[in-house]
Amino acid sequence: MDYAKELLSALNEFVVDTKWQLIGSIDELKQRACTRLYVDTEDDELSMHPDDVLLISVNNGNEFYAMDCSCPHEGGPLELGDIEEINGGLSVVCPWHSYDFNIKTGSSSMGLWNTTYETKVANNAVYIKHDFKLSLKKVCIDTDIVNDSVIRDTVGSITKENEQEESLCTIAKTILSTPDPILKSTLTRSAYQDWLQGRIPKIGKDTMPSQPKRLDDLQIIQPGRIKRGKGGTLAIDLSWDIIGRFSSFQTNGEIDLPREFFHDFIKVADDEAKHFMLLNDRLKELQSEFGCLPVHNGLWQSADETKDNILARLAIVHMVHEARGLDVHPKTKQSFSSQGDTSSVQLMDVIYRDEITHVACGMKWFTYICTHTKPPIDPVSTFHKLVKKHFKGYLKPPFNTDGRSIAGMDEKWYTPLVKP
Protein backbone atom coordinates (compact mmCIF):
# COMPACT_ATOMS: atom_id res chain seq x y z
CA MET A 1 0.00 0.00 0.00
CA ASP A 2 1.33 3.44 -0.95
CA TYR A 3 0.81 5.34 2.33
CA ALA A 4 2.33 8.55 0.94
CA LYS A 5 -0.27 8.75 -1.82
CA GLU A 6 -3.08 7.88 0.60
CA LEU A 7 -1.92 10.57 3.01
CA LEU A 8 -1.72 13.15 0.21
CA SER A 9 -5.19 12.20 -0.99
CA ALA A 10 -6.59 12.47 2.54
CA LEU A 11 -4.99 15.87 3.02
CA ASN A 12 -6.44 17.10 -0.27
CA GLU A 13 -9.90 15.90 0.73
CA PHE A 14 -9.52 17.65 4.10
CA VAL A 15 -8.64 20.96 2.44
CA VAL A 16 -11.62 20.68 0.08
CA ASP A 17 -14.01 19.73 2.87
CA THR A 18 -12.93 22.64 5.05
CA LYS A 19 -13.17 24.99 2.04
CA TRP A 20 -9.71 26.50 2.58
CA GLN A 21 -7.71 27.01 -0.57
CA LEU A 22 -4.28 28.30 -1.50
CA ILE A 23 -4.40 31.55 -3.48
CA GLY A 24 -0.72 32.33 -3.97
CA SER A 25 2.47 33.55 -2.35
CA ILE A 26 2.61 36.63 -0.17
CA ASP A 27 5.37 38.10 -2.33
CA GLU A 28 3.13 37.85 -5.39
CA LEU A 29 -0.11 39.04 -3.81
CA LYS A 30 1.25 41.99 -1.82
CA GLN A 31 2.25 43.77 -5.05
CA ARG A 32 -1.29 45.16 -5.38
CA ALA A 33 -3.58 46.53 -2.67
CA CYS A 34 -6.66 45.08 -4.41
CA THR A 35 -6.71 41.89 -6.45
CA ARG A 36 -9.76 40.35 -8.10
CA LEU A 37 -10.09 36.59 -7.67
CA TYR A 38 -12.36 34.90 -10.19
CA VAL A 39 -14.86 32.27 -9.11
CA ASP A 40 -14.54 29.06 -11.12
CA THR A 41 -17.89 27.22 -11.19
CA GLU A 42 -17.37 25.42 -14.50
CA ASP A 43 -17.90 22.02 -12.89
CA ASP A 44 -20.72 23.05 -10.57
CA GLU A 45 -24.44 22.85 -11.31
CA LEU A 46 -25.50 26.21 -10.00
CA SER A 47 -28.75 28.14 -10.21
CA MET A 48 -26.79 31.38 -9.97
CA HIS A 49 -23.22 32.51 -10.32
CA PRO A 50 -21.55 33.71 -7.10
CA ASP A 51 -19.68 36.98 -6.98
CA ASP A 52 -15.95 37.15 -7.55
CA VAL A 53 -13.77 37.87 -4.52
CA LEU A 54 -11.69 40.95 -3.72
CA LEU A 55 -8.39 40.18 -1.97
CA ILE A 56 -6.99 43.17 -0.07
CA SER A 57 -3.35 43.46 0.99
CA VAL A 58 -2.36 45.94 3.72
CA ASN A 59 0.58 46.54 6.04
CA ASN A 60 3.10 45.63 3.34
CA GLY A 61 1.61 42.20 2.82
CA ASN A 62 1.49 41.24 6.49
CA GLU A 63 -2.33 41.26 6.49
CA PHE A 64 -4.86 40.09 3.90
CA TYR A 65 -8.65 40.46 3.86
CA ALA A 66 -11.31 39.26 1.44
CA MET A 67 -14.87 40.28 0.52
CA ASP A 68 -17.28 40.13 -2.42
CA CYS A 69 -15.86 42.06 -5.35
CA SER A 70 -19.07 43.83 -6.47
CA CYS A 71 -20.31 46.80 -4.48
CA PRO A 72 -23.71 45.86 -2.97
CA HIS A 73 -25.00 49.34 -3.81
CA GLU A 74 -25.04 49.09 -7.61
CA GLY A 75 -22.42 46.49 -8.51
CA GLY A 76 -19.40 48.77 -8.80
CA PRO A 77 -15.96 47.11 -9.24
CA LEU A 78 -14.37 47.30 -5.79
CA GLU A 79 -11.03 46.07 -7.14
CA LEU A 80 -10.70 49.53 -8.74
CA GLY A 81 -11.43 51.30 -5.45
CA ASP A 82 -9.06 52.99 -3.03
CA ILE A 83 -8.19 51.86 0.50
CA GLU A 84 -8.87 54.69 2.95
CA GLU A 85 -9.05 55.12 6.71
CA ILE A 86 -12.68 55.73 7.69
CA ASN A 87 -14.06 55.85 11.25
CA GLY A 88 -10.84 54.47 12.68
CA GLY A 89 -10.53 51.49 10.33
CA LEU A 90 -9.44 50.72 6.79
CA SER A 91 -12.16 50.56 4.14
CA VAL A 92 -12.30 49.98 0.41
CA VAL A 93 -14.18 52.79 -1.37
CA CYS A 94 -16.23 51.99 -4.46
CA PRO A 95 -15.09 54.05 -7.48
CA TRP A 96 -18.66 54.54 -8.73
CA HIS A 97 -20.55 56.17 -5.87
CA SER A 98 -17.99 56.25 -3.02
CA TYR A 99 -19.69 53.66 -0.82
CA ASP A 100 -17.14 52.45 1.74
CA PHE A 101 -16.78 48.94 3.20
CA ASN A 102 -14.65 48.06 6.21
CA ILE A 103 -12.09 45.47 5.07
CA LYS A 104 -12.48 43.45 8.30
CA THR A 105 -16.24 43.50 8.86
CA GLY A 106 -17.75 44.47 5.49
CA SER A 107 -19.81 47.20 7.20
CA SER A 108 -20.34 50.59 5.59
CA SER A 109 -20.76 54.06 7.07
CA MET A 110 -23.72 54.37 4.66
CA GLY A 111 -25.58 51.42 6.20
CA LEU A 112 -24.92 48.74 3.61
CA TRP A 113 -23.01 45.52 4.21
CA ASN A 114 -20.66 43.44 2.09
CA THR A 115 -19.91 39.74 2.56
CA THR A 116 -16.41 39.00 3.92
CA TYR A 117 -14.38 35.77 3.94
CA GLU A 118 -11.80 34.33 6.31
CA THR A 119 -8.15 34.54 5.28
CA LYS A 120 -4.97 32.98 6.68
CA VAL A 121 -1.28 33.52 6.06
CA ALA A 122 1.04 30.53 6.51
CA ASN A 123 4.42 29.52 5.09
CA ASN A 124 4.62 32.67 2.95
CA ALA A 125 1.28 31.84 1.31
CA VAL A 126 -2.26 33.27 1.44
CA TYR A 127 -5.33 31.08 1.98
CA ILE A 128 -9.04 31.96 1.72
CA LYS A 129 -12.05 30.03 2.97
CA HIS A 130 -14.64 30.00 0.19
CA ASP A 131 -17.29 27.63 -1.16
CA PHE A 132 -15.97 27.77 -4.73
CA LYS A 133 -12.62 27.49 -6.42
CA LEU A 134 -10.88 30.84 -6.82
CA SER A 135 -8.43 31.77 -9.54
CA LEU A 136 -6.14 34.72 -10.25
CA LYS A 137 -6.99 34.33 -13.93
CA LYS A 138 -10.41 34.79 -15.50
CA VAL A 139 -12.16 31.51 -16.19
CA CYS A 140 -14.94 30.67 -18.61
CA ILE A 141 -18.22 30.95 -16.69
CA ASP A 142 -21.34 29.08 -17.63
CA THR A 143 -24.23 30.56 -15.69
CA ASP A 144 -26.90 28.47 -17.39
CA ILE A 145 -28.55 25.62 -15.50
CA VAL A 146 -30.35 24.35 -18.56
CA ASN A 147 -29.08 23.04 -21.88
CA ASP A 148 -27.81 25.72 -24.28
CA SER A 149 -30.26 24.64 -26.97
CA VAL A 150 -33.20 25.06 -24.56
CA ILE A 151 -32.22 28.65 -23.88
CA ARG A 152 -31.78 29.35 -27.58
CA ASP A 153 -35.20 27.90 -28.33
CA THR A 154 -36.75 29.96 -25.54
CA VAL A 155 -35.00 33.20 -26.34
CA GLY A 156 -35.62 32.95 -30.06
CA SER A 157 -33.77 35.87 -31.57
CA ILE A 158 -31.24 36.05 -28.76
CA THR A 159 -28.77 33.54 -30.19
CA LYS A 160 -25.22 33.59 -31.34
CA GLU A 161 -26.41 33.55 -34.94
CA ASN A 162 -28.42 36.73 -34.38
CA GLU A 163 -26.06 38.61 -32.08
CA GLN A 164 -26.15 41.66 -34.33
CA GLU A 165 -29.90 42.04 -33.60
CA GLU A 166 -29.59 41.56 -29.87
CA SER A 167 -30.61 44.42 -27.60
CA LEU A 168 -31.57 44.87 -23.99
CA CYS A 169 -35.21 45.35 -25.01
CA THR A 170 -35.41 42.10 -26.98
CA ILE A 171 -34.06 40.32 -23.93
CA ALA A 172 -36.59 42.11 -21.71
CA LYS A 173 -39.46 41.01 -23.94
CA THR A 174 -38.20 37.43 -24.01
CA ILE A 175 -37.86 37.18 -20.24
CA LEU A 176 -41.28 38.74 -19.67
CA SER A 177 -42.68 36.13 -22.08
CA THR A 178 -40.99 33.24 -20.26
CA PRO A 179 -43.43 31.53 -17.86
CA ASP A 180 -41.06 29.18 -16.04
CA PRO A 181 -39.60 31.04 -13.02
CA ILE A 182 -36.36 29.02 -12.96
CA LEU A 183 -35.67 29.71 -16.62
CA LYS A 184 -36.74 33.34 -16.18
CA SER A 185 -34.22 33.72 -13.36
CA THR A 186 -31.48 31.91 -15.26
CA LEU A 187 -31.93 34.07 -18.36
CA THR A 188 -31.84 37.17 -16.17
CA ARG A 189 -28.60 36.20 -14.46
CA SER A 190 -27.03 35.27 -17.78
CA ALA A 191 -28.14 38.56 -19.37
CA TYR A 192 -26.63 40.54 -16.51
CA GLN A 193 -23.27 38.87 -17.02
CA ASP A 194 -23.50 39.53 -20.77
CA TRP A 195 -24.27 43.18 -20.03
CA LEU A 196 -21.29 43.52 -17.70
CA GLN A 197 -19.01 41.96 -20.31
CA GLY A 198 -20.24 44.35 -23.01
CA ARG A 199 -21.97 41.64 -25.04
CA ILE A 200 -25.25 43.62 -25.15
CA PRO A 201 -24.20 46.88 -26.80
CA LYS A 202 -27.64 48.20 -27.75
CA ILE A 203 -30.58 49.30 -25.60
CA GLY A 204 -32.94 48.98 -28.58
CA LYS A 205 -36.70 49.28 -28.73
CA ASP A 206 -39.49 46.70 -28.58
CA THR A 207 -43.10 46.33 -27.50
CA MET A 208 -43.48 44.77 -24.08
CA PRO A 209 -46.27 42.24 -23.38
CA SER A 210 -49.31 43.56 -21.54
CA GLN A 211 -48.49 41.22 -18.68
CA PRO A 212 -45.77 38.64 -17.96
CA LYS A 213 -46.33 34.97 -18.71
CA ARG A 214 -47.09 32.63 -15.81
CA LEU A 215 -47.11 28.85 -15.47
CA ASP A 216 -50.53 27.40 -16.21
CA ASP A 217 -50.75 25.66 -12.82
CA LEU A 218 -49.83 28.76 -10.80
CA GLN A 219 -52.81 29.77 -8.67
CA ILE A 220 -53.33 33.55 -8.81
CA ILE A 221 -56.00 35.15 -6.65
CA GLN A 222 -57.11 38.71 -5.92
CA PRO A 223 -54.70 40.74 -3.76
CA GLY A 224 -57.34 41.41 -1.12
CA ARG A 225 -57.71 37.69 -0.41
CA ILE A 226 -54.06 37.05 0.42
CA LYS A 227 -51.44 38.70 2.59
CA ARG A 228 -49.43 40.99 0.37
CA GLY A 229 -45.78 40.41 -0.31
CA LYS A 230 -43.29 40.86 -3.12
CA GLY A 231 -43.04 37.71 -5.23
CA GLY A 232 -39.61 36.88 -6.58
CA THR A 233 -40.49 36.21 -10.21
CA LEU A 234 -42.86 39.17 -10.37
CA ALA A 235 -40.13 41.47 -9.06
CA ILE A 236 -37.89 40.26 -11.89
CA ASP A 237 -40.65 41.12 -14.34
CA LEU A 238 -41.08 44.61 -12.91
CA SER A 239 -37.40 45.37 -13.44
CA TRP A 240 -37.38 44.13 -17.02
CA ASP A 241 -40.63 45.93 -17.81
CA ILE A 242 -39.33 49.35 -16.78
CA ILE A 243 -36.25 48.70 -18.95
CA GLY A 244 -38.23 47.70 -22.03
CA ARG A 245 -41.33 49.86 -21.65
CA PHE A 246 -39.48 53.14 -21.07
CA SER A 247 -36.44 52.55 -23.29
CA SER A 248 -37.63 55.36 -25.60
CA PHE A 249 -38.39 57.84 -22.82
CA GLN A 250 -36.69 61.21 -23.23
CA THR A 251 -36.51 63.98 -20.69
CA ASN A 252 -38.14 67.04 -22.20
CA GLY A 253 -38.88 64.92 -25.26
CA GLU A 254 -35.32 65.26 -26.55
CA ILE A 255 -32.72 63.66 -24.25
CA ASP A 256 -32.49 59.87 -23.89
CA LEU A 257 -32.14 58.25 -20.50
CA PRO A 258 -28.44 57.65 -19.76
CA ARG A 259 -27.07 54.13 -20.11
CA GLU A 260 -26.59 54.12 -16.35
CA PHE A 261 -30.38 53.96 -15.92
CA PHE A 262 -30.50 50.63 -17.73
CA HIS A 263 -27.43 49.36 -15.90
CA ASP A 264 -29.07 50.08 -12.55
CA PHE A 265 -32.30 48.27 -13.37
CA ILE A 266 -30.68 45.20 -14.94
CA LYS A 267 -28.70 45.00 -11.68
CA VAL A 268 -32.02 45.11 -9.78
CA ALA A 269 -33.37 42.36 -12.05
CA ASP A 270 -30.28 40.26 -11.35
CA ASP A 271 -30.73 40.76 -7.60
CA GLU A 272 -34.37 39.68 -7.84
CA ALA A 273 -33.37 36.58 -9.79
CA LYS A 274 -30.82 35.81 -7.08
CA HIS A 275 -33.50 36.31 -4.42
CA PHE A 276 -35.89 33.95 -6.17
CA MET A 277 -33.22 31.25 -6.42
CA LEU A 278 -32.32 31.64 -2.75
CA LEU A 279 -35.95 31.51 -1.66
CA ASN A 280 -36.74 28.59 -3.92
CA ASP A 281 -33.76 26.63 -2.59
CA ARG A 282 -34.86 27.37 0.97
CA LEU A 283 -38.40 26.20 0.22
CA LYS A 284 -37.00 22.94 -1.12
CA GLU A 285 -35.01 22.49 2.08
CA LEU A 286 -38.32 22.85 3.93
CA GLN A 287 -39.95 20.23 1.65
CA SER A 288 -41.93 22.80 -0.30
CA GLU A 289 -41.57 24.74 -3.55
CA PHE A 290 -42.69 27.88 -5.33
CA GLY A 291 -46.31 27.56 -6.45
CA CYS A 292 -47.49 25.35 -3.57
CA LEU A 293 -49.35 28.34 -2.17
CA PRO A 294 -51.44 30.82 -4.17
CA VAL A 295 -49.97 34.17 -5.20
CA HIS A 296 -51.47 37.55 -5.95
CA ASN A 297 -50.89 39.95 -8.84
CA GLY A 298 -51.08 43.19 -6.89
CA LEU A 299 -47.69 44.51 -7.91
CA TRP A 300 -48.38 43.98 -11.58
CA GLN A 301 -51.66 45.84 -11.18
CA SER A 302 -49.61 48.81 -9.99
CA ALA A 303 -47.25 48.35 -12.94
CA ASP A 304 -50.19 48.36 -15.35
CA GLU A 305 -51.65 51.43 -13.66
CA THR A 306 -48.37 53.30 -14.30
CA LYS A 307 -47.45 51.89 -17.72
CA ASP A 308 -47.70 55.29 -19.44
CA ASN A 309 -45.84 57.41 -16.88
CA ILE A 310 -42.26 56.67 -15.88
CA LEU A 311 -42.37 58.96 -12.84
CA ALA A 312 -45.53 57.24 -11.61
CA ARG A 313 -43.90 53.84 -12.20
CA LEU A 314 -40.81 54.80 -10.19
CA ALA A 315 -42.94 56.34 -7.44
CA ILE A 316 -45.45 53.52 -6.94
CA VAL A 317 -43.49 50.38 -7.73
CA HIS A 318 -39.95 51.31 -6.74
CA MET A 319 -40.53 53.86 -3.97
CA VAL A 320 -43.80 52.73 -2.36
CA HIS A 321 -43.91 48.95 -2.78
CA GLU A 322 -40.14 48.39 -2.56
CA ALA A 323 -39.93 50.63 0.52
CA ARG A 324 -42.80 48.70 2.09
CA GLY A 325 -40.60 45.64 1.77
CA LEU A 326 -38.09 47.38 4.03
CA ASP A 327 -40.83 48.16 6.55
CA VAL A 328 -41.92 44.53 6.97
CA HIS A 329 -38.39 43.15 7.24
CA PRO A 330 -37.91 43.52 11.02
CA LYS A 331 -41.16 41.71 11.84
CA THR A 332 -40.57 39.01 9.22
CA LYS A 333 -37.04 38.44 10.50
CA GLN A 334 -38.30 38.23 14.07
CA SER A 335 -40.88 35.62 13.07
CA PHE A 336 -38.17 33.34 11.66
CA SER A 337 -35.84 34.08 14.56
CA SER A 338 -38.46 33.15 17.15
CA GLN A 339 -38.72 29.74 15.49
CA GLY A 340 -34.96 29.25 15.59
CA ASP A 341 -34.77 29.32 11.78
CA THR A 342 -31.33 30.90 11.44
CA SER A 343 -31.01 29.89 7.77
CA SER A 344 -34.08 31.90 6.82
CA VAL A 345 -32.97 34.82 9.00
CA GLN A 346 -29.65 34.98 7.14
CA LEU A 347 -31.46 34.77 3.80
CA MET A 348 -33.79 37.62 4.81
CA ASP A 349 -30.79 39.77 5.74
CA VAL A 350 -29.22 39.21 2.30
CA ILE A 351 -32.46 40.20 0.58
CA TYR A 352 -32.96 43.18 2.88
CA ARG A 353 -29.54 44.67 2.10
CA ASP A 354 -30.23 44.34 -1.63
CA GLU A 355 -33.70 45.84 -1.31
CA ILE A 356 -32.27 48.99 0.26
CA THR A 357 -30.28 49.52 -2.95
CA HIS A 358 -33.46 48.98 -5.00
CA VAL A 359 -35.28 51.75 -3.16
CA ALA A 360 -32.20 53.93 -3.64
CA CYS A 361 -32.32 53.15 -7.36
CA GLY A 362 -35.95 54.29 -7.59
CA MET A 363 -35.15 57.44 -5.62
CA LYS A 364 -32.12 58.18 -7.79
CA TRP A 365 -33.95 58.07 -11.12
CA PHE A 366 -37.16 59.69 -9.86
CA THR A 367 -35.08 62.64 -8.64
CA TYR A 368 -33.00 62.66 -11.84
CA ILE A 369 -36.04 62.97 -14.11
CA CYS A 370 -37.65 65.63 -11.91
CA THR A 371 -34.51 67.78 -11.83
CA HIS A 372 -33.82 67.32 -15.57
CA THR A 373 -37.32 68.42 -16.55
CA LYS A 374 -37.58 71.97 -17.96
CA PRO A 375 -38.42 73.76 -15.83
CA PRO A 376 -37.35 71.42 -12.99
CA ILE A 377 -40.11 70.04 -10.77
CA ASP A 378 -39.85 69.41 -7.05
CA PRO A 379 -39.28 65.66 -6.46
CA VAL A 380 -40.97 65.42 -3.05
CA SER A 381 -44.19 67.26 -3.91
CA THR A 382 -44.35 65.44 -7.27
CA PHE A 383 -44.02 62.12 -5.46
CA HIS A 384 -46.89 63.04 -3.13
CA LYS A 385 -49.14 63.96 -6.06
CA LEU A 386 -48.40 60.74 -7.96
CA VAL A 387 -48.94 58.50 -4.92
CA LYS A 388 -52.29 60.14 -4.19
CA LYS A 389 -53.30 59.62 -7.81
CA HIS A 390 -52.04 56.11 -8.49
CA PHE A 391 -51.92 54.38 -5.09
CA LYS A 392 -55.10 53.27 -3.37
CA GLY A 393 -55.35 54.40 0.24
CA TYR A 394 -52.75 55.82 2.58
CA LEU A 395 -49.25 54.69 3.44
CA LYS A 396 -49.36 52.70 6.66
CA PRO A 397 -46.86 52.73 9.52
CA PRO A 398 -44.79 51.38 11.12
CA PHE A 399 -42.01 52.56 8.83
CA ASN A 400 -38.46 51.23 8.86
CA THR A 401 -36.96 54.70 9.16
CA ASP A 402 -33.40 53.35 9.33
CA GLY A 403 -33.70 51.29 6.14
CA ARG A 404 -35.50 54.07 4.29
CA SER A 405 -32.93 56.62 5.43
CA ILE A 406 -30.04 54.47 4.16
CA ALA A 407 -31.81 54.38 0.78
CA GLY A 408 -32.02 58.20 0.83
CA MET A 409 -35.71 58.46 1.72
CA ASP A 410 -36.18 60.61 4.81
CA GLU A 411 -39.53 61.19 6.51
CA LYS A 412 -40.59 64.17 4.40
CA TRP A 413 -41.19 61.75 1.53
CA TYR A 414 -43.74 59.54 3.27
CA THR A 415 -45.16 60.96 6.52
CA PRO A 416 -47.46 63.43 4.67
CA LEU A 417 -49.05 60.38 2.97
CA VAL A 418 -50.10 58.75 6.25
CA LYS A 419 -53.81 58.88 7.14
CA PRO A 420 -54.42 61.96 9.36
Image: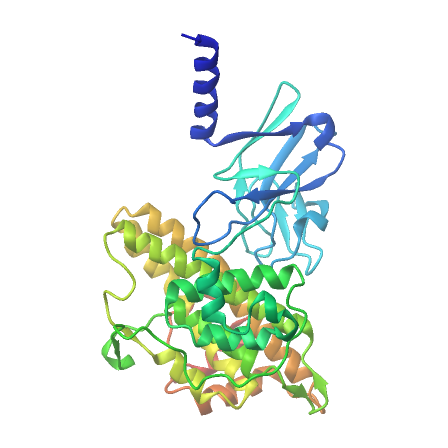
Please, which colouring scheme is shown? rainbow
Q: In the rendered image, which quarter contains the N terminus?
A: top left
70 above or below 203? above
Q: Residue at x 71, y 56 (%)?
A: 95
Residue located 47% across and 32% down the image: 19
Foreground residue, 29 or 49?
Answer: 49
**The residue positioned farthest toward the right in the image shown:** 31
The quadrant where residue 360 appears:
bottom right
Report which quarter residue 164 is drawn in: bottom right
**How far from the left and from the top, in percent, is residue 362?**
55, 74
Which percent across, then down, holds residue 263?
62, 68
Residue 402, visible in the rendered structure: no
Q: Nearer the viewer, residue 56 or 275?
A: 275
Q: Position of residue 356 (x, y in %)?
A: 51, 63
Question: Which residue corresponds to the image point at 23% horizontal and 65% vertical from the top-left?
Answer: 292
Q: Which quadrant is home to the C terminus? A: bottom left
State whether residue 386 is above or below residue 407: below
Q: How many discs appear?
A: 0
> Relative to 48, is 360 above or below?
below
Q: In the shown orientation, is residue 210 left or right of residue 371?
A: left
Residue 291 figure quarter: bottom left
Residue 206 in view of the camera: yes
Please state which of residues 233 and 71 is positioned toward the viewer in this rendering: 233
Residue at x-position 27% and y-position 46%: 340
Tell me residue 395's x, y (percent). 40, 79
